[in-house]
Structure formats: structure tokens, C-alpha cells
Amino acid sequence: MTLIQRGKSKTFHLLRRVPTRYAEVDSREKVCISLHTDSRREAETRAAGAWSGLIESWELRLRGRSNDAEESYKAAKEIARSKGFRFMPVKEVAELPIDEIIDRVLATIGPNGKPSIEISKGTLGTARAPEITVSRALKAFWDLAADRTLGKNTDQIRRWENPRKKAVANFIKAVGDIRIDHISADDMLDWKEWWLDRVRSGEVTAGTANKDFVYFGDIMETVNQGKRLGLALPVRGWNIRNREDRPERPAFSTDWIKEKLLAPDALAGLNPDARGLVIGMINTGYRPSEGACLTSAQIRLDVNIPYISIEPVGRTLKTKQAKRKIPLLGVSLEIFREFPNGFERYHKSGNVSNTINKYLTENGLRETPAHSLYSLRHSFQERMIAARVDDRIRRELFGHRLTEEKYGDPGLDVKRDQLRAAAIY
């Protein structure tokens, strides 16, 4: 860097050639920046910061010229902040007091003494908001919501992403891949009507439609906030009301489990790991995804009271209460002795429920059409209630939130003793 002294005060200035990269935003061949000191040592200290600040300013202006609408818009906001202003759309700038408008106009003057288009985009708010379509918003959402998948394994991330992809795809199918700043209440009404036609025909339930509305609204609002677009999006409050939409999942009766599911060869057509997961669920009530992820470290058969430990190993749990220890009894203990390392085929795959439910259907093993693999969890709950298992222990074994303050731990022995009457042998 070249330092020169100028004027009667002998103030040091930094003299440097404008890099070719920035020629399109600064037409000067060289720049001369006052360092506001007559001390060479102080000037040398300040020179690097002054040059760095100038580079940053040039880079912002280059970004303001970017063909990427989002990048250009973001740069305009940063330019406004660097000049000491809050970014405002040009319509709002026009409504400011005249002295504030003048300040913003004067701030558009670039280093060469001429107004800069890039600076004006920020200080005068002439930058156009990026035209983000619904499909592009989904792509932006994955980055903006990256913190929501921390700790999830590959399969959990896939299952988290899929319903969101479906919601956006359904909106595009019904309304189109429009810009998100163009989404109107009429568009949402059109989408609701599209869903209502499917609900009335019995093709889907209202609950299915409502999930799409929730996911879609979250995606659009996350992008709106994350990209600082400042849009008033009408994406909430479109749920379809239907009290009969979500009947409670039925529980398998104890007789059905004993006579049908545990009948010789009833589950023989399933692959061994899927069969083991079904039987392991009978006296534990674990969620299918919890059972699928159990490893040898979480299956304790070498202790006085054998148990499984549901933990966030390689995945996240549904709730913090889901972390728990469940004693093994009856048929579930027997199956885990057969599978001491867990159901390895499904450690990284989440399609076990689909596989099992398809098998139950094809082999007449659903007690009613509404029954599914998950019904075993409800059966476990009902048998515990019938056996008068203490409410707190039931909630802990089921992984549900306690209704009162938790003091102490009832211990595996207490849980085992209370579960004996509810277990199937």
C-alpha cells in the first residue's frame, strides 16, 4: 500500500489502484482515501481497515448487479445498512419527511462523485423484491430450516421432508407454481376447494388436507421471514373442519393377538426382522420407528430384569418423554432373545410399517380395516389400564408426558411387577 501526505495538515492518505474486478462499479483508475491522521504508524494501522472497508463496499455493489434476484435484493439491504439506513421499498421511502429523503439521495453518491445505481437500490429502496416461486421457496426452505433436522438420521430426514414436498406439489397442482408474493386469499380458497372435492368424494380425509395446509403455511412463512421479504401471506386458517375425520385408532383385542397374530406360522411370510418387530411391540408398546432403531447396546438381556432402552441413538426421539426403559416380559422377551442385536434390517430404513401393514392386509390379519401395526401400541395401553397399572408408570412406559411433577423413579422392578398382568405369554 502507498501512503502519501496531503494538505497543510500533512494528513496521510492511502493511494491504491482500483482492482480490475471492481471497474464496473468504480470508474476511477486509483483511489485516495484519507486516514485522518498525521502519524505514519497510526496511518499504517488504519490503512488495512480502510482498504478492507472499500473492498466490502465494492463487493456489495457488485452483488447488487447480480442477475440472481435474491442475491441482488439482499445486497441492497446490506448497502442500506452500511449507509446507516433501514431498507425500505421505494413507495415507503417516498412517504418519508423530505429531509430524510434528501439524506438518502445524497447517500447514493459514489466514490467518483456520481450517483450510483447500486447504492440507490439500497438507500432509496428501488431494488425489486426477488420473484420467488412456490417451488423455489421449497428449495430455500431446506436451508432456512436446517436446524430442524439436527440430530435426525437419514431416514428421519426423508420422512420429515416428504410431507412438505407433497404439500408444495399439491398446491402447484391445484393453483400453479406462482410467485409467493402473488399468493392471494383467492388462491388459497381455490386450493381449499380442490381439497374439499377430494374429501367429499371420499378419496382423502380432511385430516390429510389439513396437514398440507399446515406444512405449506410453515414453508411460506419460514421463507418470508428468513429472506426478510416482509410479505403479508394469507396462508393460515384454511383448515377443513370435520369432527369425524380422525376416529381413534382401534386396539387389537387380546384374543386376536393370541389366536391370530401369534398363531403358528401367522407371521411366517414376513421377513424375520419385521416378524420380530411385531412380536417385540406386543408387550412393550414401542413406536415402530423406536423398535426399528434398537441396537444391542439398548437391548439388555444380561441383567436381572431384562429391558430395552429407548434412546436418541443415531436419531431424534418424538418427545423428550420418549426416552425410557421398558421391562421385557412374555413373548416380547422371547423374541428379543432371538434378536439380541435388534432388527438390523431396519436400523437405517423406515419402511417397516408399510411392509407389515401390507402383509397384515394381504393375510387377513387386521381385526378390522381400521387396524394397523400401530394398533398394537393401543392394545398395550388398554391392557395396562385393564390390569390397573399405575397411571404414572403407564405414561412412562408409553413415553407420554407426566400429568404431575416427577419425583424419583419407580424402578424396573416396580414396572415389571405391574406389567405382569398386562403381558401376553
Image (cartoon, rainbow, N blue to C red):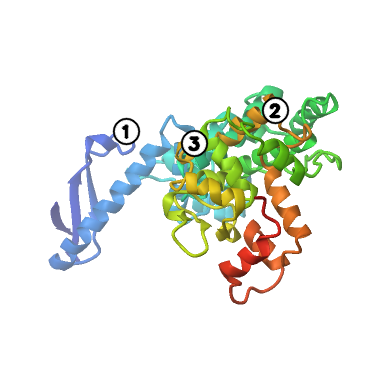
Instruction: Give amino acid for label 3.
Output: Ser
Q: Residue 31, percent across and down? A: 23, 46
Q: Which residue is mark 3?
A: 349
Helix, strand or loop at label 1? It is: loop
Left/right placement of residue 97 relative to residue 102 reads: right
Please tell me which of labels 3 and 1 falls first in the chain. 1
Residue 57: percent from left, percent from top: 34, 47
Q: Secondary structure at mark 2?
A: helix
Of residues 56 and 282, the one nearer the viewer is 282
Q: Which residue is mark 1?
A: 24
Depth check, mark 3 against mark 1: the one in front is 3
Disc 2 marks which residue?
361
Q: Residue furthest front?
A: 264
Report whether 286 appears left or right of 422. left
Helix, strand or loop at label 3? It is loop
Q: Amino acid at mark 2?
A: Thr
Alpha-carbon neighbours of circle 3 within 10 Å: few (<14), some, or many (≥20)? some
Residue 325 x %, y %: 55, 61
The CA span between labels 1 and 2 is: 68 Å
Query: In the rendered structure, which disc, 3 or 2, sits on the residue that comes first in sequence?
Result: 3
Residue at (62% x, 69% y) in the render: 414
Q: Quadrant of residue 64?
A: top left
